[in-house]
Every structure is written in C-alpha cells, then in structure tokens.
Image (cartoon, grey):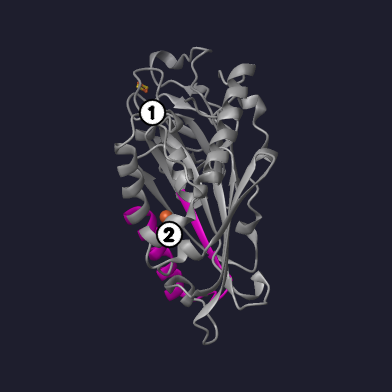
Amino acid sequence: MPYLQNCWYAAGWSREFVETPIARTILEKPVVLFRGESGACIALDDRCPHRFAPLSRGRRSGDRIVCGYHGLEFDATGRCVHNPHGGGNVPAALSIGAYPLVERYGMAWIWMGASAAADPDRIPVLPVLEDPALSWVYGQLHVSANYELVVDNLLDLTHVEFLHPFLAASDNAARTHFSARQAGDCVTAIYTITGEPISGLFQLLWEGDDTTADMHAHMHWQAPSNLYLDVGMHAPGRAHADGALIPSVHLLTPETEDSTHYFWGAGRNRRHGDEQISGMLHYGTQNAFENEDEPMIRAVRSRMNGNDLFAQRPALLSIDEASVRARRVLKRLIEAEVATGSHAI
Ligand code: FES
Ligand SMILES: [Fe+2]
C-alpha cells in the first residue's frame, strides 16, 4: 500500500530543530532537518549528490548545509551554491530535493508530495494545542510497526482497561457506550460512561471528594494519521468543561512500512504550573505508549503476514467500527491520488 503523498506530516516538535542537523526517514525517504540562522526550519534530501554522504553528517552555515565529506554547500531550496574544489565551478543542475515545511502549533509539518500543491491551509486543524485554558507536555517515540496499526490502536480505546490498568477501572469496557461517527473524511470514536470510578490519571486533577464521575472520550482522526483525543471526567449533570480535561494529540508519521514516528502532546485544564503534575503526566503518557502500546502493536504485527489487515480476515468486533472506517477513507484517498497521477512525484 503506497502512502498518501499530498498531505502534511508531522516531522517533529519545533523545539527539536536547532543548528545541529537531524536525520529522519519519512515515507522511506531520508530527510535532513535543521534550523537555519534566519530561524527557518529547513528540510532537504539527506543525500549528497556527489558521493551520497548523508548531509546530516555535515554542518549548518547560515541557511545552508555543508556536506561533511567534501564540502559542497546547499541552500534552503536544495541548490548547490558552493563547491570548494576545481576553481569553484558549480554545475547548474547540481541540486537536491527540498521539502515544504511549515511550523504550526509547535510542530514542524512536512509535505512529501508535489511541492506546488503544498497548501498550508491543509495542515491538520488542531486548535486545542493553542487553547489558553490548557497547559501541555510533549513527547515522541518510535513504533516498530506500520502506522495504520497505531491508528487502529488509538481509534479503539476499549483496549485501555486491558493494556493500561492505571488509566481505567476493571470492567470499564463493559460499562462503556461506544459509537463511531464520520463527517466527510473525518472519523470519530465516541465513548461515554456514567458513574465511573475516577482513574488514577484523573485523580491527579480531581477537585472534591467524589469517587465516581461521568466520563467522555472522543477520539478524532484526520487522514492520514493525525488524531486528537478530547477526554475528561466531570460530576454528573455538569458540562464537560467544568470537569477535569486531559486532551491529547497523536501525530503519526510513517518512517517505513514497518515503523512509525509517534509525536504526542497531553494537555490539562487544571493545576497549571505544577511541575510535579507535568512530570507525572509526561512520564505516565510516555510510559504507557512506549512500554504498553508499542510492544503490543509490534507483537500484533509479528502475527500478521504483511500490513494488509483485511487480507488476513480479522474477526471484526463492534469496537472496530471507527478504525475500519478510517482505513477505508485512507485507502480511498490513496487510490484517488494514484488514479489522478498526483501520487507520482
Ligand atoms: S559526498 Fe558530499 S561533497 Fe562529496
Ligand atoms: Fe493505548
């Protein structure tokens, strides 16, 4: 299955990109990312056209990158602008690919498709990351499995009771009301539950001496693999916003067919400025993804023959409705891209 090319992918949290070049494989292409002296984040092919040295082994010079092998220099558009050899002659066609990159919401978004189609208005809409009522912690991890398996995991929160005991009380799945909704190409998995024991996670933010509360969890998916979870617990009869909210974003970028870059952010609407809570939220989230979800997703992949899920005739349950819808939408979008020829770049 090819990747959707003409869309924005999360390349990394902005703060990650500094003077030192970073090598990152995105959609199987080696890319070098660095912040130029002007402050712009620059993404180029991580392969020098001379002897194919990774440019990520070189160094920044202004808004250029200098190859660490024989010193060819490339500007932010990928054009070779300096040759320290043979009198400085630079062949006119000597250049490498440059990728459109836009920073928004603290994330660097990269466009791997046809540059002319790179419209910043198509960056995933995630205003929650700029909501002044929330404070955030951020992280990232590497998943040794196809990105669609990670989407499946996120669009199915019934796994939480079984895989993350800190995040849900026992029998939580049996008490939860689940439905899936689709609006255009966006899919949402909706979970509601009343009179639920307040989980260890929500106790971090809970005010009052209740032991149970109502819970909602709405996981929103946008193609190809960007998700936003609106989740909270509130006293019965109160609005969601009156309760404790711990929204999160999950931005997945294929590295290869069997590996994924996973960037996450977790917000909260209470106990702002409390560094201990920030630390616990960061540790708890990273630990759950890295030591509970990732090993399970990797193990699932080890029992599959390839990444075509439906070809293996999985026993689908009602809890799979959202992930199945998302897979169908993505398949249709990729097929449309291939059919129109806009897939070839
Ligand atoms: S490999 Fe880059 S200048 Fe030679
Ligand atoms: Fe999980």
- Segment colored magenta: 263-291
Q: Is mark 2 within 8 Å of ligand 2?
A: yes
User: For residue 334, which quarter of the picture?
Assistant: top right
Tell me if 28 is positioned left or right of 248 in this view: left
Above or below 101: residue 167: below
User: For residue 161, which quarter of the picture?
Assistant: bottom left
Q: Residue 226: horizontal and vertical position, in percent?
A: 55, 45
Residue 266 painted magenta:
yes
Q: Is mark 1 within 8 Å of ligand 1?
A: yes
Badge 2 marks a residue whose secondary structure is helix
| Residue 13 in view (yes/no) | no
Above or below 120: residue 240: below
Badge 1 marks a residue whose secondary structure is loop
Instruction: Give the residue at mark 1.
Output: 67
Q: Which mark is residue 160?
A: 2
Q: CA distance from mark 1 to mark 2?
A: 47 Å
> Is 233 or 324 nearer to us in this picture?
324
Kind of residue at disc 2: Val
Kind of residue at disc 1: Cys
Residue at left offset 52%, top offset 29% = 75
Q: Which mark is residue 301?
A: none
Q: Residue 260: horizontal and vertical position, in percent?
A: 41, 40
